[in-house]
Amino acid sequence: MFFRQKRSGDHVYLQIVENRWENSGSRQRVIATVGRLDQLQKNGQLDGLLQSGAKFAEAVMVLAAHRQGKTPSIRTSRIGPAMVFGRLWEELHIPQVIERLLAGRRFALAVERILFLTVLLRLFHCAASCGRAT
């Protein structure tokens, strides 16, 4: 279905039309004549009609607005699992607890970082495999 302008005398009318196949050919059938185009535009009725129908075709309206440059530009940034878990790790003061527990011991490796990555790996390994039957 589509809108079509139909001239009759001095006036242009807005129609809703559908295409269909009859006898091996395409035929158009007028579903409804909405009214005189100039009056519909002047009274805002055409805008109201289209806005009312837009709720059934949101994707089309968004894409049309985007093509016309009327959509706001949005900046996004990705937040990875390590960043989210790292913030939780810091807010719970886990590095300080580990530092106190390891006080006086001399490790050549960054134990706190090793523990952080081990726990992070375990969380996401479980998240990936907990949904599957073993």
Image (cartoon, rainbow, N blue to C red):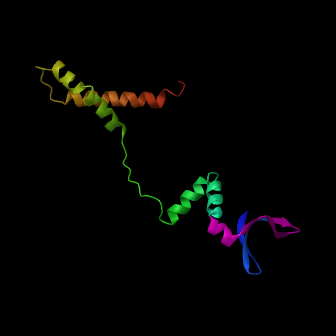
As rendered, which of 85 and 10 lies closer to the eye?
A: 10
Q: Main secondary structure of the magenta part?
A: strand
Above or below for 52 versus 64? above
In the rendered image of this protein, does residue 119 appear above or below residue 37? Answer: above
Q: Residue at x 41, y 58 (%)?
A: 73
Q: Is residue 41 left or right of residue 67?
A: right
**Between 73 and 126, the one nearer to me in the picture:** 73
Which x, y percent locates residue 87?
29, 34
Q: Is residue 93 above or below residue 54?
A: above
Of 93 and 50, which appears nearest the observer? 50
Residue at 67%, 67% (x, y): give it. 40
Asked which quadrant contains residue 31, the reply is bottom right
Numbered circles on residues, count: 0
Q: Which residues are magenta?
A: 20-43
List the single residue furthest toward the front.
43
**Location of residue 57 (image quadrant):** bottom right
The residue depicted at 61 percent of the width and 62 percent of the height is: 47
Q: Position of residue 74 (x, y in %)?
A: 41, 54
Residue 36 within the segment the image draws in magenta: yes
Residue shown at 62%/64% (left/top)?
44
List x then y, in percent, for residue 108.
Answer: 15, 29
Q: Quadrant of the N terminus?
A: bottom right
User: Left or right of 88: which side holds 74?
Assistant: right
Q: Residue furthest bottom?
A: 9
User: Residue 32 sits in which quadrant?
Assistant: bottom right
Q: Is residue 97 left or right of residue 59?
A: left
Q: Residue furthest right?
A: 23
Residue 128 colored magenta?
Answer: no
* Percent position of residue 16, x then y: 74, 65
Left or right of 115 on screen, residue 49: right
